[in-house]
Amino acid sequence: MMSNSELLKVDGVTKAFPGILANDAITFDLKAGEIHALLGENGAGKTTLVSILFGLQRPDSGRVLVNGTELELGNPRQAIVHGLGFVQQHYSLVPTLTVIENLILSLQYGSGQTLSRDQIEQRVARLSQRHGLALDTTARVERLSVSDQQQVELIKTLIRTPRVLILDEPAALHSAEEVKKLWQVLRDLAKQGVGIILIGHKLEDILAIADRITVLRRGRVVATVSAQEVNAAQLGAMMVGALAADSPRLPAPALETPVTRALEVRCLSVKGDRARAPDLLKDIDFSVGSGEILGIAGVIGSGQLELLEVITGIRMPSAGEIILHGYNISTLKIRERLTRGLALIPGDRHRDGLIGPMSLADNLALGVGGEPTSSRMGVLRLRSVYARARELMKRFGINAASPSVPAATLSGGNQQKLIFARELARNPKVILCCYPTRGLDFAATAAVHQELRLAAARGAAVIVVSIDLDEILALASRLIVIQGGRIIGEVAANEVTAAELGVMLGGGIAA
Amino acid sequence: MTRTFTAFSGRNLVISVAAVVLAFGTAALLLVVVGQNAFQSFGGMASTAVGSKFAIGTTFTKTVPRLLPALGIALALRAGLWNIGAEGQIYVGAAAATAAALFGPQLSFPLGTALALVAAMIVGAAWAAIPGMLRAYRGLNEVITTLMMVYIAVQLTNFLIEGPWLVANSTWPATPLIAVPFKLPLIWSGTLVNAGVILALLGVAILGFVVNRTTFGLWLRAIGGNEHASGVIGVPVRPMILAALAASGAFAGLAGGIEVLGVRGRLLEGFSPGYGFEAIAIALLGRLNPVGILAASLLFGALDAGAAGLQVAAAGTSSAISPVIESLAVAYLLAALGLAKTISRRREARSALHSATRK
């Protein structure tokens, strides 16, 4: 049921955040009755684009047209008035209220229409019937399953009879059966002329429903293709950037048997943050040798961040052991683990990596292991602190006016180099590294990769978590694939291509 | 190293001074509105604040109980912790000094005073350590807990003064006078300035040193700058939070001790008219800089001393104009800071777009 009327048009939308261009001249369109998927790895710019459509973010440039009328951007009310409906990934329901109460609550804000409780109940009943949704409106939301909660969100949006429906990762956390049901609902809606934008990264799911697919990568549109014309492998390749699936492989470092086991993780499990939530990590077992670079690949939210947090001591495991050079560190405090030779390059530089308002020199002095030079009996030796800062700036190529400038004023690449300098200065035995080049330009990326290779060459064991499969393949000699908190596979880096890996991560055929 | 703190950053100085000037201007306007001669009123204030040797001494004496707690508040605030309860720490510090002097070993002069002051600091620290512990290990908001501890402290000292420590045949609630070996001596003839002034000045130097020149201070600033990252980097965040609040309480406790041993000579009900709360304003007005805090507490001390002269010079003017000026100064400061933040955020956003699109 494809008509050719253009329902929504995104025209050259650009949005920059400090250090990263989240959306770079994005252009795409949605036709009435069409299901259009936005596909891309996390960080590709999908979420930013959707928040712009919804007026939650104001783009730096570009236009959005709904039925030919330009949308006033940066105003969420406008989006609703123009018939845009949004089912978010994280549901905004009040758990202690019933389904119907939640629906009433949502209709009181920004809808521009006042409905009585009876009217709302009638509409809900009609909607449920039409789409075969079985929803007990008197049940409290906290008692509903995740997929039922999503139905509530969906109905919440449908009550306003949107012309454009946007769903962010609707299939996440769903069983195959539930996904099938949801897809049927979406197909019905499309038949009635609703344009649907579907955001996701599970290739098979998307291929099963979408009419067209727009692939985003690093804030840009890679391509918009018809779903009939592509297969999962091609999409995977587009997502991770290896456009030619048979691109020449980088010579992977030789896979040697690690001489020393630098870090061993045994049967590590971590419970979910809330009661009844699934385990974040389950029975994780692996080891890394000195001089080895191990890559951890997985779709975001598979547990890779939690794994690094547990090893560092930010999070405590519910079971299992972490052995660093033969010593069980699983009960030690963060500082003690760092002193014993662990180093963490965190994924979120601003939140976890450095103290923005403090000077470069102070940030470097904070590093564990710098004490003998930077302080004596708890008193700072400012001259040594500055001398050491200058030396590290030189060694790691940190480009800054002086050691006394605040870390927050540095560019993303220099901030990352600063973190590397602080953590690698003590010659750690094991380096945990998360998204090491996120938001960095080409030169800074190369410098960071070089630094990691050098560290490995000096005998450090390196663990790299990245969303960029090319990066993992270029750095690591061995890969662990993680999904839903479990290790689902292990491969040598020179035996897979990025495209194959992309399919694996997308829940396709496990190697 | 962190120039914003050690050296007066030009912008900080301008903002604080401008806030004070505006506050005086607004107060002058208020005086005119109620039919007073503003010059005459301010002249009267100046006479009892800085008009004579004795007046200057009074200003100094009234500066100390504001300065020390403000230093402590600034220390905690460097770690991002709001010690709202300095008032309570002043009271328990005063009670501890009194107890040491009345019931402790009868030592000779410098030792007795030292003992009483150390007791004041320890108890002040312990009082603040309770919210510190709750914040560090249980995540309770220190703003609430430190504030609640004030009421407990005030009522506890009231109980001691009216009950077990009440002096015989007294007409109002007070403890017996403290013996000379425990008292802080007067150090400037012709004034009531006691040796506590020296301790307060030492406090200024110590705060500057600790915050800028020690690992403790480095960790303190790290936690204040980014608590989460500090933990990841390896700073022992929880013990540091506890220590920061305890140290903050020690400063306030010392102020209470000095007030008893140097000024009042005994523990009195309600001896602090809210020094600990004023100190929060002073710490902010001084922009957490030790020297800035010294300047701000001198100003507040002078306003307090001047309040007496105001009523003499301009009959009918309420001495309440002093706290009005104080409050206005803080209000203007906060407004200016808010404005400065908005401006710099806009600038940042613009330059972020620039640098991102340049690529």
Image (tube, coloured by chain):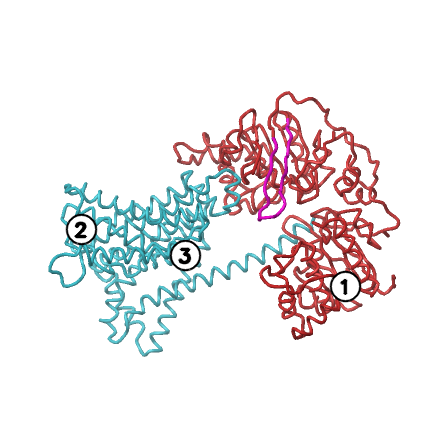
Name the residue carrying label 3. Answer: B144
Same subunit under labels 1 and 3? Answer: no
Asked if disc 1 and disc 3 are in contact, CB closer than 8 Å, the reply is: no
Q: Which chain is red?
A: A
The image quadrant that residue A151 belongs to is: bottom right
Label 3 lies in what chain?
A: B
The image quadrant that residue A474 belongs to is: top right
Label 1 lies in what chain?
A: A
Q: Colour of chain B?
A: cyan
Is A23 included in the stretch rendered in magenta? no
Q: Give amino acid for label 3.
A: Ile
Q: Position of residue A431 (x, y in %)?
A: 60, 32
Mark 3 vs 2, N-terminal side = 3
Which label number is shown at residue B186? 2
Q: Is residue A60 visible?
A: no
Name the residue carrying label 1. Answer: A164
Residue beneath the point at 52% across and 39% down? B233
Residue beneath the point at 33% across and 52% down? B69
